[in-house]
Image: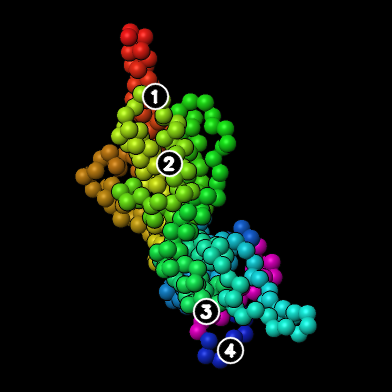
Amino acid sequence: MTRQPATPAKPGDPPSARIVAELRRRIASGELRVGDRLPSTRQIARQWQVAIATATKVLTLLRHEGLVRALPGVGTVVVRTPRPAARPERRPGGRRPSAPGEDLHRDPIVQAAIELADAEGLAALSMRGVAGKLGVATMSLYRHVESKDDLISHMTDAVFGEARLPDTPPAGWRARLTVAARLQWSIYRRHPWLAQLVSITRPQPLRNLLVHGEWALAAIDGLGLDAATMLHVHVTLFSYVRGLAINIEWENEAEAASGLTEEEWMDAHSPALGELAASGAFPTFAKVLADLSDNYDLDLDLLFEFGLEPLLDGLAPLLDGTRARAAATQQSS
């Protein structure tokens, strides 16, 4: 494969900056459109004759700019085009424009932080990065959020408020819990960093998060359950969704750290797995591995749906049985 020409760079610019400039140019020109997949780290390393670490840095820098995003099982894809440089605003009467940060308030800070975490992961989130995205001084943020932890709390509350639960709930506890689980999964899918922030042992007092808790508890209210059992049902379902969702961000971080997509990682480790299967020590594993289709992919969305129905099936004897016993008790009294 021939080496790709890079956009002319300033003397002394590192290779990663030259490659980022070239890929940014391709995105801006439409050569790479929204939804198109970028070259993998290995492809970048070969095309530009650079180390894997440099290629990984290229994709990280583009994610930091919010131009691309890593999707598990897909790779790094374009999510938006570069914005043209804004022209200085001219005010009537020769009045000077507002200085950066003068008109700032909390909502755009939270939104910029969400976009940064979506593009590059929670580990890359910093007050300096958010300030840079907004074009303001870092210290100006602290007039609106107390700390990074405070900012993260506002981010969590904001994203849980993005997707609205139906104004009219469906009939039956099962349908209502299904709505709750699928809506939460969709939120984690849009914001992979979110799953590692919510806790069942130290629940955050956030209004939009409590909206989801209220919906789940209301779904099983009136079935004759005591308070502890109601809470256990809610936490069990919430933990199932969150537990699977944590893998979305872990996969993004693993890809950024290793430079390998999930598919590339599996290809690299297939010989070792084959040796273990052939050793005779794991006959069931070997049988399953041999019977798997060549195009099998551990799809997290399919896995979520696969586990949701059996989980609700497992709760049915408790929820329906308690209601039946309560009705029988009322009739006999």
Q: What's the amino acid at mark 3?
A: Ala
The image position of residue 171, as x and y in percent, is 52, 26
**Which residue in the protein does label 3 denote?**
137
**Is residue 24 found inside the magenta-colored segment of the image?**
yes
Query: Circle 1 is placed at which residue position?
Result: 223
Disc 2 element: helix
Residue placed most toward the observer, 258 or 45: 258
Name the secondary structure under disc 3: loop
Q: Quadrant of residue 96?
A: bottom right
Q: Give residue 270's quadrant in the image.
A: bottom left
Res 261 quadrant in image? bottom left
Quick one: SS at disc 1? loop
| Identity, as a three-letter code, of the amino acid under mark 2 | Gly
- State the residue position of label 2: 213
To which residue does mark 4 refer? 10
Q: Of the residues shown, which amino acid type is indicated by label 4?
A: Lys
